[in-house]
Image: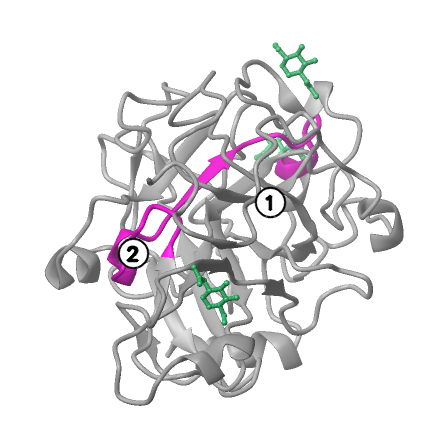
């Protein structure tokens, strides 16, 4: 169902929302939401977005950052997920899986992720019935949990799925776990966040309970109304990442289990998770969310930059360890 809607979105202008690419910013062990101040944090992350990214992040990031790897030049948010590694089935060494571009992104996008902020679903904005409130400065949240280890729990995280790619546009069915066979065009990981806010807290102790999810099946479809406990409808945020597993296939003996693991040593895909730290400048995201009947660029309400400029945005590597490989253990997991 989801791959159907995404394919349509790529060929026809649909209503309501933003879809854009951000190049990779950095890959290191930092996590300003879950482990603020820790240099290094417990596991490796793949991070995109603004250059205010740091071990600790407070206040209005959109005011502080001076560049972003995102095509939307007013978006200084940071977006990150765990990193996929290949664990060699014979000798147990690890190698980081490279990230490649998704389909239909701006020329020059390098790795990174595809980011969506939708209002209602792919086909309508429904702003009359359901106004969208942009995230406020300082807002942050996570979705998923590295300790999730059963199929049932993972299935209940409706926004967190994989596809075994035949091609970038032929994604095949959604999977709850990592694919159990080599995927011709890599592994597609998707993270949908909840969209209902309690209206008060920029964060919560578990980084999740200030938000509430009403999607039952698929984050790109129409979400039921927000409950009284979390009454404020925010943009439906989603990340897509394409992990290019293909160069490891020759080292994956036929009939043996999936050799790809997340950077927290998750041998099943169930612990997939993602973090968001809001950083749009001024009212730019709200401006886009107030527009109807257009997609991709918020009806021209958002400034874009060439990816050649976006790709010049960098941050310091505060940890300074090899995260690529071949490694005898995953960074932080020895
Ligand atoms: C990161 O945080 C450190 C310590 O607070 C600070 O000295 C440094 O300037 C920050 N870097 C950026 C890019 O904000
Ligand atoms: C494991 O195999 C890979 C691929 O052949 C190799 O590059 C790596 O050095 C090996 N690791 C060890 C510990 O032998
Ligand atoms: C967005 O729409 C709301 C409701 O119509 C309005 O109050 C607000 O000023 C608008 N914000 C922007 C930035 O356009």
Question: Relative to 290, is 184 on the left or the right?
Answer: left
Residue 312 in the image: state x and y as whole percent. 84, 43
> Residue at the spot x=45%, y=29% of the render?
140
Kindly report which numbered mark, 2 or 1, lies closer to the viewer in this rendering: 2
Residue 320 in the image: state x and y as whole percent. 61, 32
Task: Give the tally of numbered discs.
Answer: 2
> Residue at the spot x=38%, y=33% of the render?
42
Badge 2 or badge 1: first in the primary sequence = 2
- The colour scheme of the drawn protein is one colour
Residue 253 in the image: state x and y as whole percent. 35, 85
Local crowd size for mark 1, using a 10 Å CA cut-off: few (<14), some (14–19), many (≥20): many
Q: Secondary structure at mark 1?
A: helix
Ligand 3, seen in the image, is in the quarter at top right
Residue named by callout 1: 289
Residue 149 in the image: state x and y as whole percent. 16, 53
Look at the image and tell me in which quarter the C terminus lies. top left
Task: Classify mark 1 as within 8 Å of ligand 3 or not, answering yes or no.
Answer: yes
> Residue at the spot x=19%, y=62% of the render?
155
The label shown at residue 215 is 2
- Labels 2 & 1 near each other (Cβ < 8 A): no
Look at the image and tell me in which quarter the N terminus lies. bottom left
Between marks 2 and 1, how big is the CA–CA gap? 19 Å
């Amino acid at each position: 169902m989801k791959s159907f809607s995404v394919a349509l979105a790529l060929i026809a202008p649909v209503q309501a929302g933003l879809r854009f690419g951000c190049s990779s910013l950095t890959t290191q062990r930092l996590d300003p939401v879950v482990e603020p101040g820790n240099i290094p944090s417990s596991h490796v992350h793949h991070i995109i977005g603004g250059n205010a990214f740091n071990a600790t992040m407070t206040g209005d990031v959109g005011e502080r950052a001076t560049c972003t790897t995102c095509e939307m030049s007013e978006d200084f948010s940071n977006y990150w997920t765990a990193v996929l590694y290949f664990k060699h089935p014979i000798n147990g060494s690890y190698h980081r899986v490279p990230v490649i571009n998704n389909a239909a992104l701006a020329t020059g996008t390098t790795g990174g992720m595809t980011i969506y902020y939708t209002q209602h679903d792919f086909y309508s904005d429904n702003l009359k019935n359901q106004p969208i409130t942009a995230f406020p400065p300082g807002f942050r949240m996570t979705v998923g949990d590295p300790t999730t280890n059963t199929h049932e729990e993972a299935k209940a995280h409706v926004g967190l799925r994989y596809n075994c790619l035949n091609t970038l546009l032929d994604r095949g069915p959604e999977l709850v776990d990592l694919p159990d066979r080599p995927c011709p065009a890599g592994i597609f990981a998707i993270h949908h966040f909840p969209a209902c806010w309690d209206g008060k807290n920029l964060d919560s102790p578990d980084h999740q309970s200030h938000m509430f999810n009403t999607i039952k099946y698929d984050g790109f479809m129409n979400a039921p109304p927000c409950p009284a406990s979390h009454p404020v409808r925010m943009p439906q945020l989603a990340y897509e990442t394409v992990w290019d597993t293909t160069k490891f296939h020759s080292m994956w003996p036929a009939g043996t289990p999936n050799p790809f693991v997340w950077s927290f040593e998750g041998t099943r895909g169930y612990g997939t998770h993602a973090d968001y730290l809001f950083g749009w400048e001024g009212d730019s995201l709200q401006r886009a969310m107030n527009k109807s009947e257009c997609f991709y660029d918020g009806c021209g309400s958002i400034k874009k930059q060439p990816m050649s400029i976006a790709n010049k945005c960098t941050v310091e590597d505060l940890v300074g360890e090899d995260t690529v490989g071949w490694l005898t253990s995953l960074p932080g997991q020895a």
